[in-house]
Amino acid sequence: MHLTSDEEKMLAGEHGPVLERSFRLLVRLGEIYGADKMIPIGSVQVAGVSYKSIGDIGLEFLEDYASQGAKVKVLTFLNPAGMDLENWSALGFPKEFAEKQLKIIDAFRSMGIIISATCTPYLAGNLPRFGEHIAWSESSAVSFANSVIGARTNREGGPSALAAAICGVSANYGLHQNEARKPNIKIEIDEKLDLRSGSDFGALGYYVGKQVKNKIPFFSGIKTEAATTSTLKALGAAMAASGAVALYHIRDITPEANNMPVEGLETLHVEPEAIEETYAKLTTGEVPDIVIVGCPHSSLLEVEKIANALAGKSLKRPFWVCTSRVIKHTADDMGFTGIIEKAGGMVVADTCMVVAPIEDMGYRITGVNSGKAANYLPGFCKQDVVFARLEDLISKCI
Ligand code: F3S
């Protein structure tokens, strides 16, 4: 791999131990995956933030790195934490957990990382341009950035994203290069399949991800009016969870699709039954003891729609709407939070149903409208799941 003279110096430790250690990790990855050089990156999104995920070992590593003077060189956002960083006590998060989580946040803050705590950085102030090289790590954010925006990132791990942030570069391999962005399977959506909601797209994503694993699917038959920011983030999140899809294309909708070669590709046809069967397959419980929506984190429009759906209702079970703090502030100002709270729900910032320790907070059956959350909740949070459309989840709570 070609390195510039400055990069050689970094590797030789001339810029200090933190840069040396970080750059060495990037070089190693580049060697493994056959990179020809390092490339500058426009932004980073770092995962591995929840104390539930990284534990004391992760906390010690971050505090050690921060104490050695680690600083990021490019705009760097954080994935969700394990709790609402302001309202954790009222929501019932354990105090011991909160103390550790806040230390993790302090370590990231001291490195110059924006405490965005969201998996939708593109809705919260970190929007890359088409073709821009970035190093993001949360799988749904990676999928959205690659597919919907047309930016270029591999699915980074927490440590490699942090190293890229500290060095300001990433190794040039995989989805940074044109060749690796070509589709290798076609997905034909049956014309009778009427995809209406984020949960329908989540079910589709779960179904397709299971079949295609880490391939790059090329969809046809998705109606333009159904493909919104909300539905596309739900689709990508679920495909990245049930499979390992980091990039997808949709004819006439995503920016690179219509220039991609698709002749002769293996084809998977998706019938309407596949969607209803996926709802049934992912549902293992009957009555949720909490409903949590906002996976990936809700957009402002989604929060508004939920507020409209809950207006005047009285919820008999806990109902959380997860989003970023940036969106929550605007939802507060617009009165959406007030409407949701009046119905008995909560707008919860900085965290989500998967990275929060909900299993330690007394919850056993969680209702979700996200294919990704339905995929992870049994394993990560020991939950039975009710996977349903938003209106059905609301009706189970009143
Ligand atoms: Fe985001 Fe948590 Fe879902 S990180 S994509 S809301 S599992």
Image: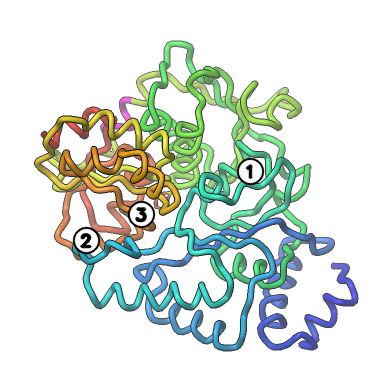
Q: Is mark 1 within 8 Å of ligand 1?
A: no
The quarter of the displayed image where residue 20 is located: bottom right
Q: Amino acid at mark 3?
A: Ala
Provide the residue designation for mark 1.
146
Quick one: quadrant of the C terminus? top left
In space, the residues marked 1 and 2 are separated at their CA atoms by 33 Å
Q: For mark 1, give the secondary structure.
A: helix
Residue numbers of the magenta segment: 276-280
Q: For mark 2, give the secondary structure.
A: helix
Identify the residue shown where x is 58% and y is 46%: 246
Residue 4 x %, y %? 89, 71
Tell me, for residue 349, which label it has, or none.
3
Q: For mark 3, give the secondary structure.
A: strand
- Whether residue 324 is situated above or below residue 226 in the rendered picture: below
- Whether residue 364 is situated above or below residue 6 in the rendered picture: above
Point out the residue furthest to the top here: 192
Tell me, for residue 359, which label it has, or none.
2
Nearer-the-camera pick, 320 or 201: 320
Principal secondary structure, stretch drawn in magenta: helix
The quarter of the displayed image where residue 2 is located: bottom right
